[in-house]
Amino acid sequence: MRGSVFSYVASFHDFALVCQSLGQTSSRLQIAQLAGDFLTQLGVDEAEIAARFMVGSPLPQGAERRLQVSGRAIWRVVAEIVPDDEHRGEEIFATAIDFGEAIEILLRLRAIEPPPTLMLGDVEQRLAEIAKIEGPNSRRRKFEVLRELFARANALEGKYLAKILIREMRHGMSEGLMLEAIARMAGRPVGEIRRAHMLDTDLGRIVRQLHPRPTGVEPGQAVPGPRAVPSPDGFHDDSITTESTSSPPSQTQLSPPPKPIRPMLAAPAAGVAAAFGILGASLALEYKLDGARVQIHCAKSAVYIFSRRMNEISPSLPEVADLMAPLRERQAIFDGEVIAVGAHGEALAFQELMRRFGRVRAIERVRAEQPIRLFIFDLIGIDGNLLIDTSYQQRYDRLAELAAQTGLELAPRIVPVSIAEGQGFYARAITAGCEGVMAKGMSSLYTPGARGRGWLKIKNARTLDLVIVAANWGYGRRHGWLSNYHLAARDPAGGQYLEVGKTFKGLTDADFEEMTKRLQALKVEERGGTVFVRPEIVVEVAYSDIQRSPRYSVGMALRFARILHVRFDKSAEEADTIETLTAEFERQLVKPLNLQK
């Protein structure tokens, strides 16, 4: 690194060099040390950007979802800068370890390598500009900004710019290791930083608040002492606060939206009996609804609704805001599920609900066309206090009291006294059109962002026997293997196999290696990193549901597909048909809605 901690200004090339170093070590300690030292040497603004970029987050939380830049778009833009032909692209994808390296190889074919002039702030500014582009010709205008950015980037910079855009850094820096790096930067115990991350998921904001040189401190000035890491005791601590001598905001200043808390996650369990074995007899079971998870903050200023990915979706669900408005004075935070319902109250498929998410135009018309229903299943905070360190039993008791007072609808739930009673409840959940049930330990705490053993999900998986018709060469750990499989159903009328989804999930490394050999023997064509094969290998595929999709000619696609087994006992002619897929799709479109216990 150049210069002292107070004079160092990093270019994007410097950032790329650090990322390159991260990818050359497998030591967790060394990765955290390299990143922490780099962040310490940067100014606050640069450190905030670098922390996000290192974990593949191009913009602050919420803004990155508006980028909408695909790997295909990036390749197209770079290929225009460096004239490419199909044969060259195939060669590059065959040799590159990952997509970023493929972009680097392509950029090195330019006659002249541009000097490293990009700064971290330049890159973030251009990405923010792309995220704001919408309306007519938005795709063309996004491409123009991308083209200018990649034209300025040298090959190494282009590699990591591409990785940030597709959010696949593949250099060993996880969110967990970034928290260790921030702890090193701030000189604080890593446990405190992890706690801070529970309450504010944006790593850049955490870096900004804990950086050793706060905003406004110039090189050579004295640096104030350590600043406070948030406590979970009150909502006002949901962002990391700093000591300040500035005057309080005026009465007319608008309060910013609250920051969402990372949702608690569930681990899978094979069945109700397995859940009893893991959690013991002290557990509750509740219906696992086929909807979208939402976190609702009832603040004094307004009701704020966040998606599972912690993007604010309040304008899309005004009826939820109206329903929860009476609880604004209680300053409560709820965890719940929204489902789509039909004209007669019947539950509709998940994809129908997705018509509502992210919509901000003509919302009243869409609201009338697609009603929704809200079910609450947890209370994360009340009266200005977070309850994440309170047991599930205590949280639920308080939630039930609130529901009785306000009419909130809770997810159907029982506290079974036996495995048999629990299995009966699971059967009723499936009959009611649910995905399965959730099992929750009575003493479990609410652990934001953690997939522990306090909550378990027991799902009813659906399966189809499908044919592999193509596969993509893998990146990272799967480099050198054909590992992203194109799945197809049989069309008896036309004698074709029509794609309905892709997956790389479900196989071991040994399976990938063996499947690559089998598919290579069936190869009929290769284009752009995709190998097309004769339709001979049948696999049993589990999936959560089938959704509408314009991507495939059949108009349908599997959601959350994963391979369970290779069906050596079946020929391609015995695979499931498009008619079977259509029947399953139509069956799930409208479900019974019997949510009694």
Image: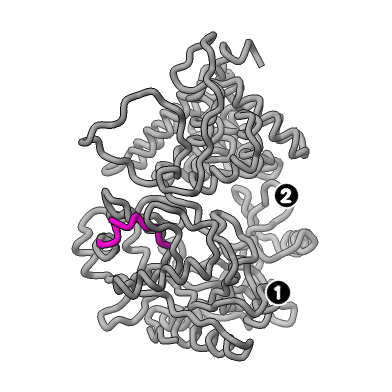
Mark 1 neighbour density, 10 Å: few (under 14) some (14–19) many (20 or more) = some
Which amino acid is tagged 1?
A: His
Image location of residue 435, percent across then percent down? 50, 77
User: Which disc is residue 477 wearing?
Assistant: 2
Q: Which residues are magenta?
A: 326-334
Q: Is residue 135 visible?
A: yes
Which amino acid is tagged 2?
A: Arg
Q: Is residue 105 visible?
A: no
Mark 2 neighbour density, 10 Å: few (under 14) some (14–19) many (20 or more) = few
Res 155 quadrant in image: top right
Q: CA distance from mark 2 to mark 1?
A: 21 Å
Res 366 quadrant in image: bottom left
Image location of residue 568, percent across then percent down? 74, 78
**330 in the magenta segment:** yes
Image location of residue 566, percent across then percent down? 71, 73
The quadrant in which the C terminus is found is bottom left
* Label 2 element class: helix
Q: Which residue is mark 1?
A: 565
Above or below residue 426? Residue 504 is above
**482 in the magenta segment:** no
Image location of residue 91, percent across then percent down? 67, 41
